[in-house]
Amino acid sequence: MFKFNFDVEDDGEQGIGSLGENSTTQNRGPASAQTVVPDAFTELSLVNALDSLPSKISYSPITIPLASGGELSLPRRDLFDARFQLISQNADDPDASEQPSVVNARSALQFLDAPSDLVPLVYEGGLKTWECSLDLASYLDSISSQFDVRGKRVLEIGCGTSIPSLYILHRIFSSPPSQNQTHIHLQDYNASVLELVTIPNIILTWYLSEAAETYRKSEEEQTDSASLELNMSDNLKDTFHQSLITYGVHLRFFSGSWDTFDLRKLGGSYNLVLTSETIYCMESLPSLAAVMRGACNAEGPTDTYQYLCLVAAKVLYFGVGGGVAEFVRCVRDLDTGGTVETVWEKTQGVERRVMSVRWN
Ligand SMILES: C[S@@+](CC[C@H](N)C(=O)[O-])C[C@H]1O[C@@H](n2cnc3c(N)ncnc32)[C@H](O)[C@@H]1O
């Protein structure tokens, strides 16, 4: 049985969100009981987020075991590096203590230092990678020959370190450029998660891909190839933006609670809707399901692969209430409802699933 573990550090090897059987589990009671005003829907600028990063960011590989038997390594910004950034943002401008960016930095620092993986409606766990996100990336790999993501509209809900989207971007940047325009929208509760890990992970994924080979070679003399650090030069950012155009990739980033998620501002429905480790909270399940349903334009034709709506999760989130059974019930009971089919599962140890949702 899975419990959110608020005592355990990262597992050390992969920096996976804390898990554990025997840990002390803080339920959502005390924080939920307070009147917390959820963060509102906001769009973040990619350019500003890249400009706010320090001159170097450090990273480590995370390994995704693939269903095919192989494995894929993707880069992820180190959490300690994000922490240094926050500390220096605080120190650089002590007078600006009430500016939103400084307030955000201060509270993000609390999340990084807190012995807790979740503070309901304050910080929802996105700084760390949760293991079902690897399952979802692996599942996407297993269907990649039937589902070409290029030219599609993709939404990752509750993305955090965004491993499934990184997998998609890795594929796009490892294939020849195509005329197809691919829209990838990423949502997280916390703007600071998008700024500190999601966006850095995306530029890192590009940097290590075939799309950036020429850039990497041009930088080789100035870079210590053994160090896992990326120089955030203007040249790097310009080349990245140029590559996005060449590969037809359009990225947008949204923060805020699902209650406030405004699909009308996002340019239409999606062909691929992804989410992992987001069904743990009973209270937010209806708003999560409503975002998913709206994003899939459930009124439209429902041919196979008109849309794919995939949810990766543990079967049971003990101590916080949610899980697969509650999610299935919530989907069934929502407006006209929908059905959930398990497309991949792990039944040993902590049970995990990837599910496909079809909306009625
Ligand atoms: C446990 S983390 C999982 C992160 C990532 N998907 C993974 O698997 O590594 C849960 C994610 O859901 C998002 N989330 C949780 N509750 C939310 C809510 N009520 N509104 C918006 N986002 C929420 C958080 O931003 C967070 O990134």
Image (cartoon, rainbow, N blue to C red):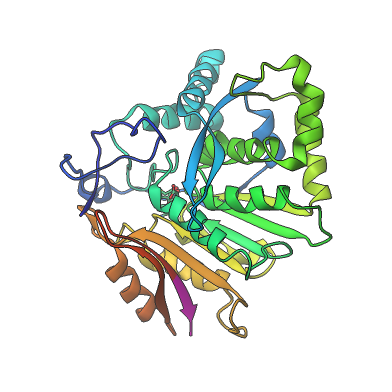
Quarter of the image where one finds residue 195: top right
Q: Is residue 336 above or below residue 324?
A: below
Decide whether residue 358 is among the magenta residues.
Answer: yes
Residue 39 percent location from the top left of the image: 46, 48
* Residue 152, percent from left and from top: 69, 65
Q: Is residue 162 left or right of residue 343?
A: right
Q: Foreground residue, 129 or 360?
A: 129
Where does residue 86 sit, x and y in percent of width and height?
A: 50, 23
**Horizontal placement of 248 versus 142: left or right?**
right
* Residue at x 15%, y 42% (from the top left corner): 22
Which residue is painted at 42% across and 82% down in the image?
A: 337
Tell me where residue 338 sits by quadrant: bottom left
The magenta span reads: 356-360
On the image, the x and y values in percent for residue 287 come to: 42, 65
Residue at x 56% of width, y 66% of height: 143
Residue 50 left/right relative to 34: right
Q: Tell me the quarter of the image containing the N terminus.
A: bottom left
**Res 84 seen here:** yes
Residue 340 or residue 60, whichever sits in front: 60
